[in-house]
Image (cartoon, rainbow, N blue to C red):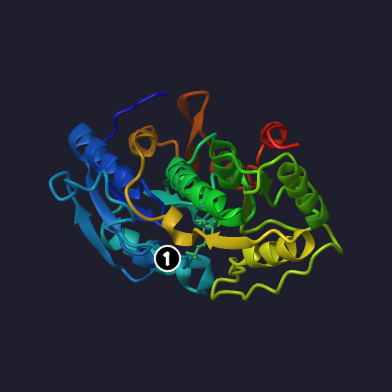
């Protein structure tokens, strides 16, 4: 990737959307590359776009960012607020940037935050995006940081659930995150030896789920793990799910599908069934070594993109390398789980 060194700059960085292990590693990398590599000043805006809307920020330095590499969460705070939620949002963003002589921004976020970044860039703000989400569903990048950590946590939980399920001859339904896609469910289900994995990409029939469990139990195994992504969808007319409440940002508040699935399994098969919702445990705590390294790579690549004045792009991980893609293209479509991987996952428990 080209690295062009330009005039000294002041840059801003913000983290938006749901938090994710590795955010602090990106922030640290941005600061190191900017301050030590280019002699630039870095301002960290607080709570996502809110920092620019409300002029809330702190100066970030290499010394001040010491020790944050392995820390979960984000030292800057995060939120789902966006400039276009306010009539004067762009004016406020521009005023903050001008007030502090900020030349360009690094925006670290998922689908919502990066879509806003694409729109803010169209309004003339120079910026580069960094894809963040444990769900791994951002387009045009093969990996987002945080995903590996979430899969590791889910797999460890499944390993633990196996031993208690086997001791009691039970089915345990484990619910993992995955609002629109089943990357976490599929990878953790494969790694943890789940009998069935349910993902949003392939609507499921509860009758098939029960038949597969029954086949396995007829073969002598009396315990099974079912992994269900929170956003999994039953085939029309096969199972009723309760309406999910809508949060302040218009998002469905998911969580709890495992209860419906477990009740149905127990009543149809007679197998004693329990549930575990992993929830935000998957997003908390220290990132894996892979996520720390990937996040650091993303941070350096984002500052390099600013140095090259390649604005309106997102740094993306493709074929073991960092590239830049147009931000608008990256957020145009979510990256779904490959049908090939879903087929592989099914192979183990026909
Ligand atoms: O970051 C994405 C995600 O983890 C989704 O999988 C999940 O549905 C959502 O965040 C929940 O976020 P929150 O509870 O913070 O609104």
Looking at the picture, how far across and down is residue 235, in whole percent? 82, 57
Question: What residue is at 55 percent from the left and 71 percent from the top?
Answer: 249
**Residue bearing the label numbered 1:** 79
Question: What residue is at 24 percent from the left and 49 percent from the top?
Answer: 42
| Viewport quadrant of the N terminus | top left
Can residue 3 be seen at all in this image of the molecule? yes
Q: Is mark 1 within 8 Å of ligand 1?
A: no
In the displayed image of the protein, which residue is found farthest to the left? 63
- Residue 175 lies left or right of residue 216; in this view the side is left
Few, some or many C-alpha atoms within 10 Å of disc 1 (few <14, some 14-19, many ≥20)? some
Q: Is residue 310 above or below residue 252?
A: above
Looking at the picture, how far across and down is residue 344, in whole percent? 68, 31
**Depth check: 134 or 132 in front?**
134
Looking at the picture, how far across and down is residue 342, in whole percent? 69, 37
In the displayed image of the protein, which residue is found farthest to the right? 237
Count every numbered label the image shows and give the total: 1
**Depth check: 162 or 82 in front?**
162
Can residue 138 be seen at all in this image of the molecule? no
Looking at the picture, how far across and down is residue 95, in whole percent? 35, 65
Q: Secondary structure at mark 1?
A: loop
Q: Splitting the image into 4 quarters, where does residue 92 fall? A: bottom left
- Residue 107 lies left or right of residue 260; in this view the side is left
Q: Splitting the image into 4 quarters, where does residue 170 fall? A: bottom right
**Depth check: 244 or 32 in front?**
244
Question: What residue is at 66 percent from the left and 33 percent from the top?
Answer: 341
Q: Is residue 140 above or below residue 27?
A: above
Question: What residue is at 28 percent from the left and 67 percent from the top?
Answer: 56
| Viewport quadrant of the C terminus | top right
């Amino acid at each position: 990737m080209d690295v062009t060194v330009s005039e000294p700059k002041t840059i801003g960085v913000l983290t938006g959307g749901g938090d994710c292990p590795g955010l602090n590693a990106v922030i640290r990398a941005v600061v190191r590359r900017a301050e030590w590599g280019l002699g630039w000043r870095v301002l960290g805006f607080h709570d996502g776009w809110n920092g620019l809307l409300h002029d809330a920020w702190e100066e970030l330095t290499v010394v001040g960012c010491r020790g944050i590499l392995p820390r979960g969460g984000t030292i800057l705070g995060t939120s789902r607020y966006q400039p276009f939620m306010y009539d004067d949002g762009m004016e406020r963003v521009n005023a903050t940037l001008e007030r502090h002589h900020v030349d360009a921004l690094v925006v670290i976020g998922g689908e919502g935050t990066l879509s806003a970044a694409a729109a803010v860039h169209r309004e003339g703000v120079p910026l580069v995006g960094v894809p963040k989400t444990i769900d791994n569903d951002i387009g045009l990048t093969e990996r987002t940081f945080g995903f590996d950590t979430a899969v590791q946590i889910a797999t460890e939980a499944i390993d633990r659930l196996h031993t208690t399920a086997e001791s009691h001859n039970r089915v345990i339904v484990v619910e993992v995150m995955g609002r629109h896609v089943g990357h976490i469910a599929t990878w953790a289900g494969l790694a943890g030896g789940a009998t069935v994995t349910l993902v949003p990409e392939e609507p499921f029939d509860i009758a098939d789920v029960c038949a597969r469990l029954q086949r396995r139990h007829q073969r002598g195994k009396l315990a099974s793990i079912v992994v269900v992504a929170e956003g999994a969808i039953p085939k029309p007319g096969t199972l009723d799910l309760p309406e999910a409440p809508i949060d302040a940002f218009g998002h469905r508040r998911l969580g709890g599908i495992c209860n419906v699935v477990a009740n149905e399994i127990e009543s149809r098969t007679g197998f004693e069934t329990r549930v575990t919702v992993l929830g935000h445990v998957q997003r908390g705590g220290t990132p894996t070594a892979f996520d720390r390294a990937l996040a650091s790579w993303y941070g350096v690549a984002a500052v390099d993109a600013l140095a090259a004045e390649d604005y309106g792009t997102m740094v993306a991980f493709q074929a073991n390398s960092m590239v830049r893609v147009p931000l608008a293209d990256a957020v145009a479509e979510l990256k779904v789980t490959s049908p090939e991987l879903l087929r592989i996952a099914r192979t183990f428990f026909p």
